[in-house]
Amino acid sequence: MADHISIFILIGCTYTPFILFYYHTEPGIKFLTLHWSIIIFGILFKLIFKTKYEIVSLGLYLILGWMVVFIFNEISNGMSFPVFFWLIAGGLSYTIGVYFYVRTRIQWHHAIWHIL
């Protein structure tokens, strides 16, 4: 369970510097507050329900990871191409990893998910 709770924290800690550096405005701070509120909700949800509703946790991971599309124009304006590339590559890698997470018949599916 700790590894799944850590995913919420990882997503938040990945987003925070991007928002603070590229979108340090009042709407950016509101977005970051919403993002961390969902993270805290996800952590509490996981602590209360543990593995009972895995699909909810997985959905929250994906929502949190892709929330950036709602403010993409605002944060991408000042980004260099390498920063932009690695941000997108990370999101795609994580999303592809979800495929392996839900495919329990694939040997080592959970480990592959963590690697991606």
Image: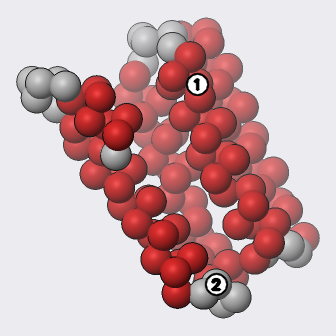
Mark 1 and mark 2 in contact? Answer it, CB < 8 Å.
no
Whether residue 60 sits left or right of residue 16 in the image: it is left
Q: Nearer the viewer, residue 58 or 115?
A: 115
Q: Residue at x 51, y 25 (%)?
A: 4
Q: Position of residue 12 (x, y in %)?
A: 67, 46
- Relative to 12, 81 lies left or right: left
Q: In the rendered view, would you say 92 is above or below 109?
A: below
Residue at the image position 49 percent from the left and 41 percent from the top: 61
User: Mark 2: which secondary structure?
Assistant: loop
Q: Is residue 102 visible?
A: no
Q: Is residue 66 above or below residue 35?
A: below
User: In the rendered structure, which disc, 1 or 2, sits on the residue that comes first in sequence?
Assistant: 1
Marks 1 and 2, how far apart at CA = 30 Å
Q: Amino acid at mark 1?
A: Ile
The image's colour scheme reads: secondary structure
In the picture, the disc for residue 79 is 2
Q: Is residue 32 left or right of residue 81?
A: right
Q: Viewed as shown, does residue 46 lie left or right of 114? A: right
In depth, the one of 94 and 60 nearer the eye is 94
Q: Is residue 66 above or below residue 41?
A: below
The residue type indicated by label 2 comes to Met
Spot occupied by residue 47 in the image (x, y as percentages of width and height): 62, 12
Q: Quadrant of residue 56?
A: top left
Image point (51%, 14%), residue name: 1
Query: Where residue 5 sits in the image (x, y, percent)?
Result: 58, 24
Identify the element where label 1 is drawn: helix
Task: Evaluate whether residue 82 shows in this view.
Answer: yes
Residue position marked by numbered label 1 in the rendering: 5
